[in-house]
Amino acid sequence: METTLTSGRIRVRPRTRANIVLHVTLIVLVLLTIYGLATLDTRNINIFTAFGDMLNNFRIVLFEARLKNLSWLELFRELMITVALGLITTVLGAIIAFFVALFAAQNLAPRRVTDAVKAVMAFIRAVPTVLWVLFFAVTAGLGSIAAVVGMTFHSISYLVKAYAETFEELDEGVLEALRASGANWWQTIFQAVVPSSASALLSWTFVRFEINFSVAIAMGATAGAGGIGFDMFMASAFYLDLRELGIFTYAVLIFAILLEWGATRLKETVGVKRQA
Amino acid sequence: MSLLEVDAVTKRYGPETLALDSVTFSVQPGEFVAIIGPSGAGKSTLLRCINRLIDITAGDIRFAGVSVPTLRGSALRRHRIQIGMIFQHYNLVNRLSVLENVLHGRLGYKNTLQGILGLYSEEEKREAVRILETLGLSEQMYKRCDQLSGGQKQRVGIARALVQQPKMLLCDEPIASLDPSSAKVIMDTLQEINRSTGITVLVNLHQVDVALHYAKRIIGMNRGRIVYDGAPHNLSSDQIYHIYGSEAGELILDLKERYAA
Amino acid sequence: MQPNAFLRRRRLQSIFFLAVIAAITYGSMVLTQFDLVQGLGVIPRAFVWAITNFVPDERAWSRLPRILEKLQETVLVAVASSTIASIFGLGLALLGANTTRPHPWFSLPARAIASIFRNIDVSVWALILLFSFGQSGFTGFFALSFVTFGFITRVMIETIDEVGIEPVEALRATGASYAAIISQSVIPACLPQLISWVLYMIETNIRSATLVGILTGTGIGFLFDLYFKSFSYGSASLVVLATVVAVLLIEAVSNYIRRTIL
């Protein structure tokens, strides 16, 4: 520690590693942002007229929304297809992820196994969902099968991480007590691990459902998964109908807010923080 | 002339709760006053009315001849500069260093730009370091506040108040979260500041024995009213019972033990 | 018999819950015409196909410079949108958080605005923005920024309120101005969390940018789509590989930064 009461300037902020890393990170982010904006592929679009245009388009979406190519019943059906895609992938993902996560939690499996499982999961997670869906579409063709399998893959990798972390937070004493009483591995899982982490697992699963609903919209728009995402893509790219797109936007926004509200309520009762 | 005059101050929260009920007292420069009373008596509210962290409902507060309740903007900030405040939970920015937290006491003197950028003069920094040395914290100057003990944190809080060069210190339960030996250090420090610099000290305390030991004057509060105002040695067991109500039994027992010892 | 009845009821509840989920899932499969058996069959076939066809070939490697160029474009858009949106998000969070809002009336509108921005999916934003910005980098940039803005506002409101009113109260008592309190107390206390969330959003936005790129014809998503639709699977696989390396690299750097500053 430097002496300070002598002549010369007194340093106010200590030069700790945390402070240095914080500042370097900030500076790098700002520089990359400036460079990113300077090299943005603008394709000769005048940002100011386009921005004004955007505000006007928002007004149309908000206040002049109406249906044209679809009836309200069809809209509901399309929305439900998207919800169904989100639900199937969440349920399948949760079932598979539960068993995989048992081998990814350090208090349940040997270190070598957990490291390997976590590495594979990190790889799966690093591939954007849309690339997974398109990958499976090569053999399955574009449609619900490729969409479900691709989305499930990404869900598994996400849920394995969340579940494994939940398992790792379990009280070691509970596990020990059961092991001491002669319970085998599977008994320990279903008598101690599952009951004490069930609500946290449920909360994470619901968060993933929230995500998968959004992903299902995106896959409808980009990877032929059907549902409301596909209708939105058609309205935007094919019919150029901003007003009908407005109705679709309202529909998915309301549903997403409902889901978020549900997830928040679940998290509050369970006390799980959103994943960082 | 009194430094502080509190005149028939009333504070209501909603139509039902009366936190302060026509409180009147005045404080002379250099006094060491302890305000005692059970939790919920309105002690914290009273202190926060003096530096206007809370607005009063009726009455008047004059500090150094200036009427406080109508102050706005920069005049209010100038008023707050003259009063240092010390909190039960220290109220430090835990991620920042001790020195940075102490220098926060100078922010009231800054214009907007200086305040936003946190520009302090060398003079101010030297003063902050000097105060930290007198409080025995020079070793901790560059430590993060969350690495300090409770007693050390409270001394940082005192240092932050002192760099303001205040006329008065408002101490809101300064020792309620501390162990007995740290509490003694803090109370001794406050007493020493009062004696050597003549800064007026107004301290909220829950513990009667501490108040009796340090204060020259006791104000007893109950349910938003002043029920005792006078010298510590005139405070009888009956009056303590009057101030604390049903909580009193334990306190009087403590008191007897202290006198017996 | 009390404990037995209790256990039996809990088991019945669990079974009922699982049965409902199973029924809804089955209904969903009917609605989406998803066949579980076919779905399971796809996985081995896809990977067998991948071993021979989805590996970078010579032509793919010759395209590497172009792939890296597009990847850089995507990463930069993700960084720029995350950073800029976070600045605005922090601003709205300060207006909306209980401890820093200028007036209680600000809270609800701030939270409502944030909710709308983050609950419209990035692909939906892109479809709307295509009308004004066309197939340019702006579409993706704004789509990512809007979602990030809503997300950062929400998490920063929580972070600011977690830090609590205490330091703010102490600085008010010293006579500090509102601006000084924010910049000297609230922001230093929340900055590590904010950076952590920005890094998280950059990771998320690289994946989202790939998706948006398919819609707007920009960045690495466009390139993947191009190779994929022209059956250049070797090149497409190299795109995936490059993306994975970039994401994992950024994750590693983020984790290091998080460990150091939090």
Image (cartoon, coloured by chain):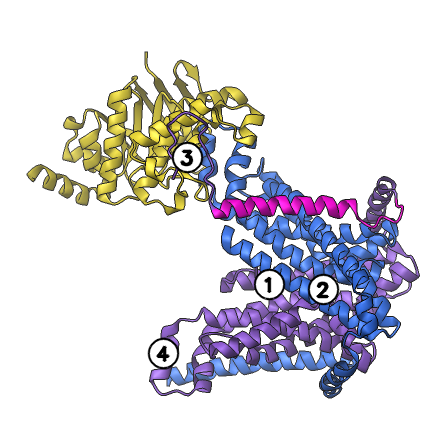
Chain colours: A purple, B yellow, C blue
Q: Amino acid at mark 2?
A: Ser
Q: Residue at x 21, y 30 (%)?
A: B214
Q: Residue A44 lies in magenta, yes or no?
A: yes
Q: Residue furthest right?
A: A239
Query: Residue A169 location, x and y as percent?
Result: 45, 68
The 10 Å Cα crowd at callout 4, few under 14, some 14 to 19, many 20 or more, is: some
Chain letter of the residue beneath label 1 in the structure image: A
Residues at discs 1 and 2 both on one chain? yes
The span shown in magenta is A17-45
Question: Is A61 rendered above or below residue A210?
Answer: above
Residue at the image position 89 percent from the left and 46 percent from the top: A44
Q: Which is more N-terminal, label 2 or label 4?
A: 4
Q: Is residue A230 left or right of residue A275?
A: right
Q: Mark 1 = which residue? A: A263
Residue underneath mark 2: A214
Residue designated by label 4: A176
Q: Position of residue B146 (x, y in %)?
A: 40, 46
Mark 1: few/some/many CA within 10 Å (<14, 14-19, 20+): many
- Mark 4, secondary structure of its residue: helix
Question: What amino acid type should be assigned to the residue bearing mark 4?
Answer: Glu
Quarter of the image with the C terminus of chain A in it: bottom right
- Secondary element type, mark 3: helix
Q: Which mark is residue B99?
A: 3
- Judged by depth in the image, the label closer to the viewer, 2 or 3, is 3
CA gap, disc 1 to disc 2?
14 Å
What residue type is disc 1 on?
A: Ala
Helix, strand or loop for disc 2 = helix
